[in-house]
Amino acid sequence: MPKLVKLYIKNVIIGFCIAAGFVAMLLWFNVMNLWGLISQSSDGVLAVFLLWFMNGIVFAGVQFAWVIMAMAKKDEGPRGGTPVAHHFEPAPVRAEAPSGQKRQLSKRR
């Protein structure tokens, strides 16, 4: 089996294990009365399975993406050109009113 497929399967298993822990914590801490809803319903097992499975898909994708992005070659040293010392000076700007227009002031009542 290719190394990439092994890596993918391993990270999918890790993602689904993390999802199982996440769903267990949701039920343990009774978030939004989730434990009460599941234990009172005849379809509670299906709800827990779907919650675990959907979260497992998300966590598996994130886990695999994290591992793939962590494999990138790290750059050594500074990137770009030489550092430049910045000296900021104000630039004089001349502001003139457009010719032919009168200045209008609003009056308060």
Image (tube, grey):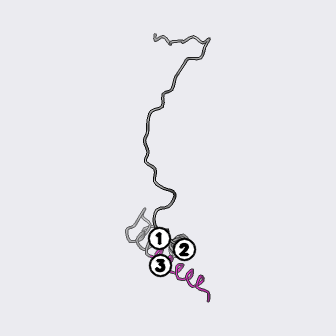
Residues at circles 1 and 2 in contact by the CB criterion of under 8 Å: no
Residue ID for mark 3: 17
Give the farthest residue toward the left: 29
Position of 52 with respect to 33 (left or right) is right
Position of the N terminus by quadrant: bottom right
Specify whether residue 39 is painted magenta. Answer: no
Q: Amino acid at mark 3?
A: Cys
Chain part drawn in magenta: 1-20
Label 3: state its secondary structure: helix
Front residue of 67 and 52: 67
Residues at circles 1 and 3 in contact by the CB criterion of under 8 Å: no
Image quadrant of residue 88? top left
Q: Position of residue 82 (x, y in %)?
A: 48, 55
Q: Earlier in the sequence, mark 1 or mark 2?
A: 1
Image quadrant of residue 30? bottom left
Disc number lying in front (1 or 3)? 3
Residue 68, numbered circle: 2
Q: Amino acid at mark 2?
A: Ile
State the CA–CA distance, disc 1 to disc 2: 36 Å
State the CA–CA distance, disc 3 to disc 2: 19 Å
Q: Position of residue 7 (x, y in %)?
A: 55, 82
Q: Residue at x 60, y 83 (%)?
A: 5
Residue 38, numbered circle: 1
Crowd rating for badge 2 (residues with CA inside 10 Å; few <14, some 14–19, many 20+): few
Q: Earlier in the sequence, mark 3 or mark 2?
A: 3
